[in-house]
Image (cartoon, rainbow, N blue to C red):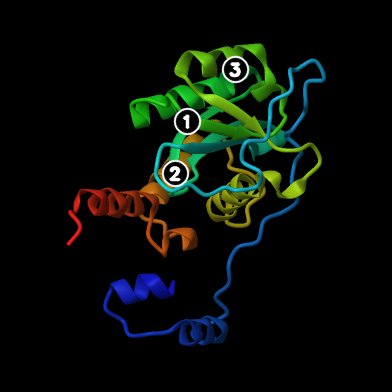
Amino acid sequence: MTAELREKGRCVNEKRVARIMRRFSITGIRLRGRVRTTVPDPAASPVPDLFQRDFTATEPGRKYMGDITYLPLAGGKFLRLTTGLDCFSRKVVGWSIAGHMRTGLVADALRMAVSTRGRLSGAVVRSDHGAQYGSRAFAGLCDQLGVTRSMGAVGISAGNAACESFHASLKRETLQGAHDYGDADTRRQTVFAWLTRYNTRRRHSANGHLNPNAYEHRHHNAELTPAA
């Protein structure tokens, strides 16, 4: 909030913004309880943890992280959303929504990431131990694209904290306290609009309060600027 106001020419600090927000009872929207989405496949081949809890990157396109979350619909139904984030800027490079939990859900998000970036060869993709990410089909697609898989240790809650925090923000800001999104079409439109805004408008503290696209743009410009 402070960064947004400063960009618009307002001379304010964080303490003043917090004081005004308290005065007018302006608070963030809190999320309800979580739904378990990670169901490991006991027959899956072991995948090493190449991240070792380091979810940062020195440049775009090197390290990605993926996860699945549930999106509640009216009548107690759910759709599933999987997203792929670049560790450098937290940009959403791939995503997929479906009414199932088959491997195609995560494979479609990976293919979208290829379309967004142009190529993924040489990149590392980190996920949890869900059966979709551990399947032979997903492993084969990663090999085909030149992607190296990485999985965190089983039972370590902080292992996928960045993706879980991202999904929590998405649902908190799109549901805005509601129990569900209503029908599937409304939910698709709402989530698509939020993901677009996230990449192009939403500020991220890890990016120096820049949105992901602006942060990557600044990085590319710095690379092109010759040293003095």
> Which element is circle 3 on?
helix
Image mark for residue 195: 2
The residue mark sitting in front, 3 or 2, is: 3
Residue annotated with mark 3: 138
Label 3 to label 1: alpha-carbon separation: 15 Å
Closer to the chain start, of discs 3 and 2, is 3
Residue 68 is situated, as x and y percent measured from the top left of the image, at: 63, 34
In the image: residue 100, left or right of residue 94:
right
Residue found at x 71% / y 50%: 158
Image mark for residue 157: none
> Number of callouts in the render?
3
Residue found at x 61% / y 12%: 137
> Which element is circle 2 on?
helix
Looking at the picture, does residue 223 appear above or below residue 38? below
In the image: residue 146, left or right of residue 157:
left
Residue found at x 70% / y 45%: 159
> Which element is circle 1 on?
loop
Q: Amino acid at mark 1?
A: Ala
Front one among 129 and 227: 227
